[in-house]
Image: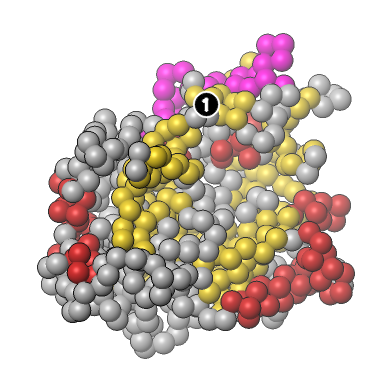
Amino acid sequence: MSNIKINKRLILSAILSASLSTGFLAGYNPAEAAYRAPSIDYLQTKDDGTVLGDYYVPSTLDNVFWGKIPSRNDKAIIHIPSGSTLTIDTVSHEGILEDQGKDPVKYFGQYGITPDHVMQDAINIAANKKGHDFDTNGPHVITGPIYVDGAEPGDVLKVEVIALEPRVPYGVVTNRHFKGTIPNEMPETPRLENPSSEHPESYGNVSVFTSIQKKGDNNEWFGIMQNNGQIIQFPLNPFLGTMGVTPNTDENGSSIPPLKTGGNIDINELGVGATLYLPVDIPGAGFYTGDPHFAQGDGEVSLTALEAPLRATVRLTVLKKGSSAIPQTNSDSLVQPFAETEKYWIPIGLNEDLDEAMRQSVRESISFISKQLGVDRKTAYAYLSAATDYEVSQVVDKTKGIHGLIPKVDFKDNLSFKLTINNIECPIKIINNVLYVPIDSVSSALKASLITNKDTTTLKFKDNTFSTKINSKDNTFSTKINSNVYEMNGISTCTNSAPTLSSEGTIFIPVSTLSEIMGLPVNWSTTGHTIIGISNYLN
């Protein structure tokens, strides 16, 4: 497979709204073909200064599988040390499949997208003579495998999601015959006999082109669907639908069903700041990823979500068998995926039977609360029934998924919470079940100047603190005490929690504002009874 360019710059990822602010559509009206090109270049396959990781992997023909996942016989496309960050250009399958003509320039052109605004790697993959079998292969473009030094069977690969940057300002949601939640009812358009990519309409499948638009008082980005003069809008929540490690098999299995080693698990909680734990099956782990999403509802009922390509940056770390940093569940070492975020532990159930997937997730939940937190099993079961939500991640990928959302703050009396920013420890206080951090600690860790004027507090950052995506001469964050409106570089955003003033006169801000407002991603992991949030992305 191809040589990989290495980029040794590690810089702070911009939050979604910042990374999109200069490059996304102002709107799209299918009736008028009102597409307008963005003011900056798209993230194609080039290095345009936005590669954040220690290493970079493009989705070239030599680096991808189309519709399949790696096997133990496949050569790694790159070897990286444990703990490294890796930037991967992922490619969406929507726009390149047979029922869309296998010609993304022509397909997206019907919606007003000019050829220079269609990703070159997608064009190359669609035109590849090695081909893709629409009826037997999965749809996904999978990038990998990636060899992580030191990983051995029985170990766990810890995957921290650091950045997810959209590569184009549009996406597609599709419903295909014989698939989805109600396969015999939708789509309602007829399928002809012997359909072909030469006549994509013969498949009778339905794809809905969706543009991106900035809307509302908070300047948030939304997916916009237009139909019969009506506008439907929904917020973006990017994540990688597929993250896995290579199973110990000679076969290149379908990319569709998730496995005990991960894969197409389609959990929309796994955005920036999430941590996923995967049991290693072969030496080097063989990490792979793909199926990027801009947004997905729980269940993914029509078959796909808002599918669109992302430039993803992840940190890959090997946790050796028996490490206290491995979530404690049903065995001495992890045997299936487990995840966590700032707010939740996420035990995962995967099974072709949705009921059994639910049982599996509950069993994992009970074992985790019992083994990790020392709660007896009967009390753990009772707690889950009273206080934990279980969500359907997806029901359309043969193997169905259920995941639990166990709130960490429910166990705050028996846990310690730590936060380090650029290797400086910042104290955490829990107020009304929300994690807060002193703003003066944040200022010190980010080498920013702190200005407080009456009830307003402002952080002024150096020009090179953040990614070049959001650099400005006046790089500032400001807020008022007891107001849940925050301002970053002149953009106001409203959140659920407001800054507060302690009895000692210290101003505390919600930890979540570091990522949601400032664009400083914080990844969380649990060791014993300690919850650790780490963000080390200062230039």
Q: Residue at x 63, y 78 (%)?
A: 355
Q: Does residue 91 show up magenta in the picture?
A: no
Q: Is residue 157 left or right of residue 227?
A: right
Residue 532 percent coordinates (x, y) = 68, 52
Residue 246 percent coordinates (x, y) = 43, 77
Q: Does residue 464 show up magenta in the picture?
A: yes
Magenta residues, dominant SS class = loop
Q: Residue at x 68, y 56 (%)?
A: 344
Q: Which residue is mark 1?
A: 217
Residue 480 percent coordinates (x, y) = 67, 20
Farthest residue, direction bottom: 250
Residue range (magenta): 452-481
Q: Is residue 258 left or right of residue 104?
A: right
- Residue 435, quarter of picture: top right
Q: Is residue 376 above or below residue 9?
A: below
Q: Which amino acid lies under the numbered mark 1 shown in the image of this protein?
A: Asp
Q: Residue at x 44, y 25 (%)?
A: 463
Of residues 120 and 506, the one drawn nearer to the viewer in this rendering: 120
Name the element at disc 1.
loop
Farthest residue, direction top: 454
Residue 176 percent coordinates (x, y) = 34, 68
Of residues 16 and 200, the one drawn nearer to the viewer in this rendering: 200
Of residues 497 and 371, the one drawn nearer to the viewer in this rendering: 497
Q: Residue at x 57, y 81 (%)?
A: 353
